[in-house]
Image: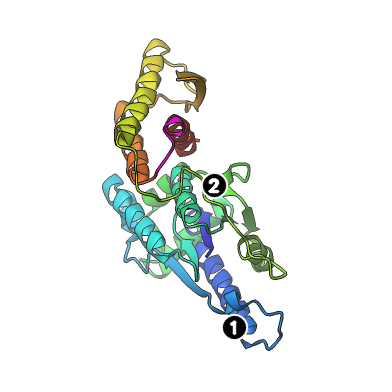
């Protein structure tokens, strides 16, 4: 069942909002279970609510100080979500979730098991987050992020955009709001009036064995061709970031939305490895590999 992705600046109150949502969902499930009405939806009574956060995974705030430990923290969070998402679970991912590419991966994991997802953006202003973080450091010493870590996370935060499919439906919760729009979120991911929310997985997310003998070769070759095209263009157009690069592949054109700063070879190779890992056991149509990889790149750097 649904995956709810909490996103916001550090010390913005994400855990507070996640707790409010968990409390609402649990209460609603219990009220449905105890209802004697013949119209009660039996699938609701089977649901459980689980919140996955850094504390439950023993991830220290200092993990976000170093690129290596941060990568390990994201991998641990992703693994926990993959294990928890299922038919009878409402999973609340209460983590940093501040990178577009990571939210895209979460979206893909949910869609792969035909379950809805949504993003809840905790809209606390930066200055207010900074005040809260400072107070937490003074009060407890371990309740906030060290100042340099906090500022770095704020700088790198990529705000959700409801126009993209992996960030939608998007619910923004202003700081002064007493509670999130719990009922609207319930209807968006569970369904209303007895109508179940159904998600149809697409070719890019359905986990199926690769049956074509040359599938892995095609996956490797096609993604490498995209990388080569990007690197060749950057070499011929130094300093021209933020452009739309049209690459020719077979009978189709693919538009890569390049970031404003040049992308290094190691960055591209890392994204390529991640994409191949995600799709190694997927059965993508050969003609869809390039398009899916370009979509993944565009989502990763926005």
User: Is 203 placed left or right of 161 in the picture?
Assistant: left
Residue placed under numbered mark 2 in the picture: 166
Residue 121 or 232: which is nearer the viewer?
Answer: 232
* Label 2 crowd bin: few (<14), some (14–19), many (20+), radius 10 Å: many
User: Is 261 placed left or right of 224 in the picture?
Assistant: right
Residue placed under numbered mark 1 in the picture: 30
Position above or below: 140 against 147:
below
Determine the residue positioned at 59% across, 44% down: 161
From which residue to which does the magenta span run? 283-288
Residue 181 or 288: which is nearer the viewer?
Answer: 288
SS at badge 2: helix
Position above or below: 94 against 125:
below
Residue 39 or 66: which is nearer the viewer?
Answer: 39
Determine the residue positioned at 34% across, 33% down: 219
Q: Is residue 258 magenta?
A: no
Position above or below: 137 against 100:
below
User: Is 20 placed left or right of 268 in the picture?
Assistant: right
Position above or below: 15 against 302:
below
**What's the image's color scheme?**
rainbow
Between discs 1 and 2, the one toward the N terminus? 1
* Label 1 crowd bin: few (<14), some (14–19), many (20+), radius 10 Å: some
**Image quadrant where residue 29 sits:** bottom right
Q: Position of residue 286 (x, y in %)?
A: 41, 32
SS at badge 1: helix
Q: Is residue 12 visible?
A: no
Query: In whole angstroms, how far apart are the C-alphas of marks 1 and 2?
Result: 30 Å
Using the image, tell me which numbered label, if any, was put on residue 169: none
Outermost residue on the top side: it is 236
Outermost residue on the left side: it is 68
């Amino acid at each position: 069942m649904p995956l709810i992705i909490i996103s916001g600046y550090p010390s913005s109150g994400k855990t507070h909002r996640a707790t409010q949502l968990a409390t609402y969902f649990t209460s609603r499930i219990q009220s449905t279970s105890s209802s004697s009405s013949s119209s009660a939806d039996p699938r609701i009574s089977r649901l459980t609510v689980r919140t996955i956060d850094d504390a439950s995974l023993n991830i220290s705030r200092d993990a976000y100080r170093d690129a290596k430990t941060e990568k390990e923290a994201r991998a641990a969070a992703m693994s926990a979500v993959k294990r928890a998402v299922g038919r009878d679970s409402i999973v609340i991912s209460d983590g940093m979730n501040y990178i577009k590419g990571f939210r895209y991966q979460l979206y893909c994991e949910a869609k792969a098991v035909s379950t809805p997802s949504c993003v809840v953006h905790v809209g606390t202003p930066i200055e207010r987050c900074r005040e809260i973080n400072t107070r937490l450091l003074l009060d407890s010493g371990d309740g906030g992020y060290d100042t340099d870590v906090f500022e770095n996370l704020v700088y790198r935060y990529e705000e959700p955009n409801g126009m993209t499919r992996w960030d939608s439906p998007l619910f923004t919760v202003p700081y002064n709001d007493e509670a999130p729009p719990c009922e609207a979120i319930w209807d968006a991911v569970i369904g209303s009036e007895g109508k179940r929310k159904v998600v149809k997985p697409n070719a890019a997310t359905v986990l199926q064995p690769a049956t074509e003998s040359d599938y892995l070769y095609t996956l490797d070759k096609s993604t490498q061709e995209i990388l080569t095209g990007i690197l060749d263009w950057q070499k011929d157009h130094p300093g021209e970031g933020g452009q739309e690069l049209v690459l020719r592949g077979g009978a189709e054109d693919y538009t890569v939305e390049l970031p404003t700063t040049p992308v290094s070879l190691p960055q591209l190779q890392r994204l390529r490895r991640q994409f191949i890992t995600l799709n190694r056991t997927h059965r993508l149509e050969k003609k869809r590999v390039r398009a899916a990889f370009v979509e993944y790149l565009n989502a990763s750097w926005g």
